[in-house]
Image: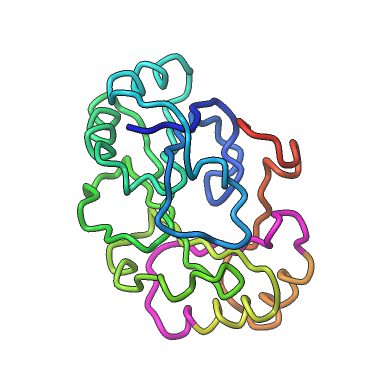
Amino acid sequence: MRISEIFFSLQGEGVLMGTPTTFVRTVGCNLDCTWCDTKYAREGGEEMSVEEVFDRVERHPTPFVSLTGGEPLIQEDIYRLLDLLLENNYHVTIETNGSIPLEQIPNSEEIMISMDIKCPSSAMADRNMYDNLEFLSPRDQVKFVIADRVDYLFARKVLREHEVNAPVVMTPMGGTKLRPLAEWVLADKLMVRVMPQMHKLIWGDRRGV
């Protein structure tokens, strides 16, 4: 596996925000979002075996692990790592960009799929795989990064046209300017969660947090 970094921090996004978590950031992505804040994970990193990654995870005290990237699902051994983590009683969040089929992911109470739906500002909205929504359950989540009103209207349209069985999170691009997005959501009475990126509120754009 090609690994960019492994670190212990607080989950900064979504319904598990604030939870002490070990992050395993893989290298490489099949998309190229304009506002990507982890471009450093597109290349480089360190080649590690599944066992070496697991040993690094074991050094940290939390049962929560986030497999992130890049795009973790393009890693050849990601499912071996996932199985090993589940066998050892970890709760695993898989952070995926939504452009790769999800049917290979095991149906487990200890897995949370955190799936992005890309909005127009990312320049990747044409890569969304809406069929993936049928694999999501209430223990998963769908995330939209909202840069402007156009993104918001796109997200609203998606939610009106597709059945979504998982909690929906909307986050402003940059992670901190919540008021306009909150006002749009309330005006439209959308049943979604408006949330910041907590790690950016605390640490800014630092890596490894």
Q: Is residue 175 magenta?
A: yes
Q: Residue 57: image x %, image y %?
A: 41, 22
Q: Residue at x 48, y 18 (%)?
A: 61
Q: Residue at x 42, y 38 (%)?
A: 26
Q: Quadrant of residue 92?
A: top left
Task: Choose between 139 and 172: the one closer to the eye.
Answer: 172
Q: Is residue 19 or residue 174 the one in the foreground?
A: 174
Point out residue 29 in the picture as x, y percentages from the top left corner.
Answer: 43, 51
Please say whether residue 191 is one of the residues in the magenta stretch.
no
Above or below, 145 against 140 in this view is below
Q: Position of residue 14 (x, y in %)?
A: 55, 51
Query: Furthest residue to the front?
Result: 44
The answer to which image quadrant residue 131 occupies is: bottom left
Q: Would residue 83 appear left or right of 28 to someone viewing this image?
A: left
Q: Which residues are magenta?
A: 158-178
Q: Residue at x 38, y 52 (%)?
A: 113
198 w.r.t. 144: above or below: above
Position of residue 52 in the picture relative to residue 77 (left or right): right
User: Is 172 placed left or right of 89 in the picture?
Assistant: right
Please determine whether, in this image, residue 130 is positioned above or below residue 56. below
Specify the quadrant of the image occupied by residue 30.
bottom left
Task: Give how far across and how far down residue 155 sits, in percent.
Answer: 55, 76
Q: Residue at image x 53%, y 50%?
A: 15
User: Can you say which quadrant of the picture contains the N terminus?
Assistant: top left
